[in-house]
Amino acid sequence: MSSFDVEETILIFKEESKSILTDFVHQLTNYEKNKDVEIITKLMRDAHSVKGSAGIVGLADVQKLAHSAEDLLAEIKNQQLSDEKVAENIIEIKNIIAQISTLISNFDENGSFEEKISEILKLLPTLKTDKSFATRLYKITNSLNPENSEVEEILKLCSKIFEKLMNCDKIDNNLINTLSGTFKILRRVVCEHSKSDDLFFLKQRMSIAEQMIDVQVKAPRPCPQKTKSNITDILKTLGQGSIRTLRIESDKLDKLFVNVGNLCTVTNKAHNYFQNMVDITAHFSAKMFELEKSLNELNILVKDEHNSAEIVQKLTDEVQKNKQNLAEIQVMFQDYEKINADESEIFLKAEKYLSNILKTVQGVRMLPIGVILHMFPRMVRDIAQGENKEVEIEITGGEVSVDKKILDEIKTPIIHLLRNAVDHGTELPEEREKNGKQRAGIISVSAKKSGKNVIISVKDDGRGIDFEKIKQKALADGILTKDEIEKSKKSELLKLILKAGFTTQDYVTEISGRGMGLDIVDTKIKELGGKIKINTEQGIGTEIILEIPVNTPSVENIEKHFEKSKKIVVIDDSQTTKIYFSNLLKNAGFNVFSYHNPLDGLAEIQHNGCDLLISDIEMPEMNGVELISQLRQDEKFQNLPIITISMLPVEKTQKMFGDIFVDVMLNKADFSEEKLLDTVNSLLN
């Protein structure tokens, strides 16, 4: 664990505990008012979580106090106390919470001399593999304030040594042993009031050690002197050594992420206003489409030989008049279409920039899961030692990255799973040997990526879950009847151990026995939108698998904002039809590219592709048959869904295309919006 990791772990612990404890007293007050047992259940979970986290950072006093708070809460939850006794318990719990808050506030800042020396002795061996711990050791040593002046001088020398070790290429093992011996002596002198150690010779030894380090540290190379430096030279020099890494406070990153979400919301609103304009014009374009159909029908009547010359003249005049009106409206729509295209391009660019910002921020928020996994070996060893068990822990998949928020949230569930694996799962060494196992139990924690989820497994090779005990407990607590138990499947019984207060343990320890651990895990994983799976075999072991989204729900929601809809290309030389179809399909949620010129539409498909083509048949420069024939010759577009829409009868259209495959042929005369959208959806799904 690097010194940065240690500081980060303590910081996370403090922030998390402060948040829990701030709400704790408030929730107790709520309980006094309405006597809601669910509040007590939640507080038991919170106390259990603080107790587990305190174990990771080595705060034994906090662990004991949190355990006492659990005891008092458990008494209240049983609802067998008098009102007077409940009130006494609540007062005592509040006092305990105040003590815990004080201990946590003072942790790593105003700890005792002995506590800080113990911390130094724990961290010293890690210098062999990670010199970054020198920073942490330097800070702790500087914070020591002994009354003995000789001890103070020795500590100053130690502090200088740690400062110089930050720049050492290699740290000598003998030096680490010397430092370790020195701090052990200082602890005896200050804490045990030992007089047997000669501090004068100890000071001499540390002074020599400092001089030896000076020899190892490379002297900085002298810079060649320039006769004159102007501002251009200075700027060039600065540019060569640009800063590539910055440490960003997580709350600032969270604020940036919130702002990205707000930008997406604003963009959505602007897009909605723009869409309102599209909806209004869609109404006009629909009317224009109907008008164009009517004109085509009038043209057919004009050509009817049975009409008199007078009727033909009137029909011809009406056609010309309406054609002129239609032409004027089409010019207006061409201007609107240009505005529409420009606005669409602006929105596309804005969304592209927002998408890039989101990816950048999201990338910064992603952290390797190893950031929290490194905390657990020490905790597992401490718990095992306290229970006279031997345990080895294996960790894999630390490189898998998840969102920082998710990382913070899954820490507590993993703590509870590991505590259970040691306490419930792993047998005593003698018992394991009798069962043909090695003395030390193996607990493995692994992480792997699966799509948008991370799969975390906590597995032990212990005794497995005893289903008979679950049945006995369920029967004793009245959760299931004897008949229900006999019919219950193992999967149904396993769900019981996830319930609050359910435990097969006969007594309560500082580690377990409340039935809160797995309840906390289940509750938290569900809050994150994940799921939990339990595999167990008696005598073989237990594996608990957590499947959790890599990103928070807020990230998922923003990502959905940028999900691309299906792309449809519309090609029609009629401005009316082109605009009408475009608006209709856009309102249905499709990404539409419309073209008046078939050559432009063909170029768009060939260069950028599409999911569906809707094309007219009778067009200048290139008709629909030529267009589609050219596309079908390209292997990439042999399976492209294509719809043709024309005033020509479908039978005539089919003859024109011959062997060229077209998915659907529609006639404008019997066209309906519902029919077109149904056809489009069926081809794209």
Image (tube, rainbow, N blue to C red):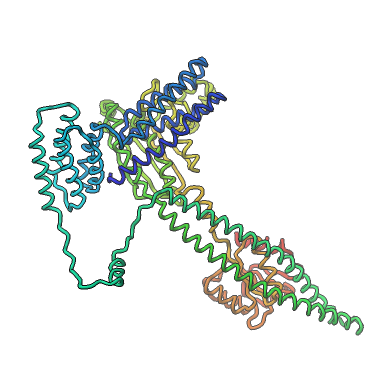
Identify the residue at horizontal 78%, vertical 80% (top origin).
324
Residue 452 at what x, y percent from top left?
A: 46, 51
* 416 left or right, relative to 343: left
Report whether residue 472 is seen: no
Which residue occupies the foreground of this view, 134 or 5? Answer: 134
Which of the two residues, 18 or 547, is positioned nearer the viewer here?
18
* Depth order, front residue of 88/283: 88
The residue at the point 23 percent across, 35 percent down is 145
- Classify residue 99 by image quadrant: top left
User: Could you tell me which quadrant the N terminus lies in?
Assistant: top left
Work out which quarter of the rendered image holds the C terminus and state it.
bottom right
Vertical placement of 614 versus 506: above or below?
A: below
Q: Residue 347: x and y, percent?
A: 57, 65
Residue 333's x, y, as percent? 70, 73
Q: Image quarter for residue 466?
A: top left
Q: State left or right for residue 415 relative to residue 525.
A: left
Horizontal side of residue 71 vs 106, given as left or right:
right
Front residue of 199/498: it is 199
Q: Does residue 233 sit above or below 559 in this rendering?
A: below
Can residue 272 be seen here?
A: yes
Residue 365 on image: x %, y %: 42, 51
